[in-house]
Amino acid sequence: MTTKSTKNIKKAAVLVPYDFGPSSEVALKEAVCITKYLKGEIYLLSVVRKGDFFSQLFRSERDNRRIQREVRNKLKELATNTKKETGVRVITIVEQGNPLDVILEQANILNAQYIIMGKLKETKPDLNIFGTSILQVISESPCPVITVSDSPIQECGFRNIVLPIDLTKQTLEKVSKAIAWAKYYNSNIHLVGVLSGGISVRKSRLHLKMEKAKLIVEREGIVCSAKLYEKSEEPVHQTIFKHVKEVNGDLLMIMTHQELGVVDSYIGAIAQKMIKVSDIPVVSFTSKAIEHNNYFVSGFLPFEIIDNKDLKHLKG
């Protein structure tokens, strides 16, 4: 009976959109590390873009089939080599259509725990040009999205996780995510915030929330720092990235949703800038992605590590 139920457990799916460019190669390597963490499987997805009316006039169905065969063969070879080198199972998917639609559709079909993708650029015109907005994928994704740059990863894991803290209600969930990752990778957590008004640091609600978050993280045996910057002429995202360099950050966790009425929140234009300019991997959470990904936290944290008192402080 036990053996049968174990076989029926579906492994965590990590979806990697792959466009044969350098950033997608880095995304695959990052996916290997994270998939080992989840004890899951990688789904490598390539999308052959469906051209507009005029481009289709010059590309026959025979050409489309040839391109798809070429992409499929290359992906299978990559999957085989990745399995041999890392032991992680890689399943390949080739679809034709709009990249954004296909990525989101596959994430839902697979019930993916993460989408890991490079900052996509045009690569080989005969294969697949994504040309899609990474911000659209993040905003509409049913799960968290991890974005990487072209910079090659040196080793698996993250030593210093940087966590911008704001006044949104989802701060608790984001702190929980960071704790889960830090416990697995034996990482340090660095909380950072930037005031948006003229109020002093000590009198700000954000200062109180950061101190409470720091206590919760340290209670789990994780080394944690907290830094709150006063408002300045410098753009918020630049202040955060200066702090990232100061603490040697190698993973950034952000929320990307809009919460009306909140002043000190890293959303919207600021989140977009952080995603676009970051040289280190960025984990982007929306409210929907947080809900979808809850099992991820419960699997690595003791039950009720954050009590009602902590919850009240972090949400208030």
Image: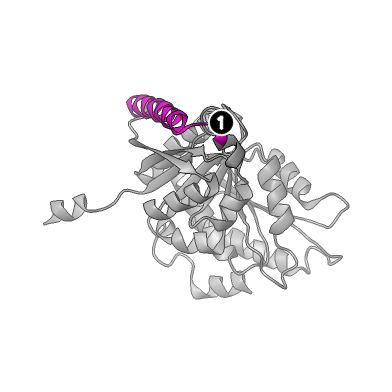
Between 57 and 38, the one lying in front of the other is 57
Q: Is residue 313 left or right of residue 228?
A: left
Q: Position of residue 143 (x, y in %)?
A: 48, 55
The residue where tag 1 is placed is: 58
Q: Is residue 85 left or right of residue 310?
A: left
Q: Is residue 11 left or right of residue 59?
A: left
The residue at the point 54 percent across, 30 percent down is 153
Q: Position of residue 167 (x, y in %)?
A: 67, 67
The residue at the point 49 percent across, 52 percent down is 104
Q: Position of residue 277 (x, y in %)?
A: 70, 41
Q: Determine whether the residue tagged by mark 1 lies in a helix, strand or loop.
A: loop
Q: Is residue 309 above or below residue 131?
A: below
Majority secondary structure in the magenta region: helix
Dot 1 alpha-carbon crowd within 10 angstroms: few under 14, some 14 to 19, many 20 or more = few
Between 47 and 205, the one lying in front of the other is 47
Asked whether 71 falls inside the magenta stretch, the response is: yes
- Quick one: quadrant of the C terminus? bottom right
| Residue span colored magenta | 57-84
Between 67 and 182, the one lying in front of the other is 67
Amino acid residing under circle 1 = Phe
Q: Is residue 239 left or right of residue 128?
A: right
Q: Is residue 84 above or below residue 182?
A: above
The residue at the point 39 percent across, 60 percent down is 302
The residue at the point 73 percent across, 64 percent down is 264
Question: Disc count in the image?
Answer: 1
Q: Position of residue 171 (x, y in %)?
A: 60, 63
- Quick one: quadrant of the N terminus? bottom left
Image coloring type: one colour
Inspect this view and state whether residue 119 appears.
no
Q: Which residue extends farthest front?
A: 57
Inspect this view and state whether residue 92 appears.
yes
Asked whether 288 falls inside the magenta stretch, the response is: no
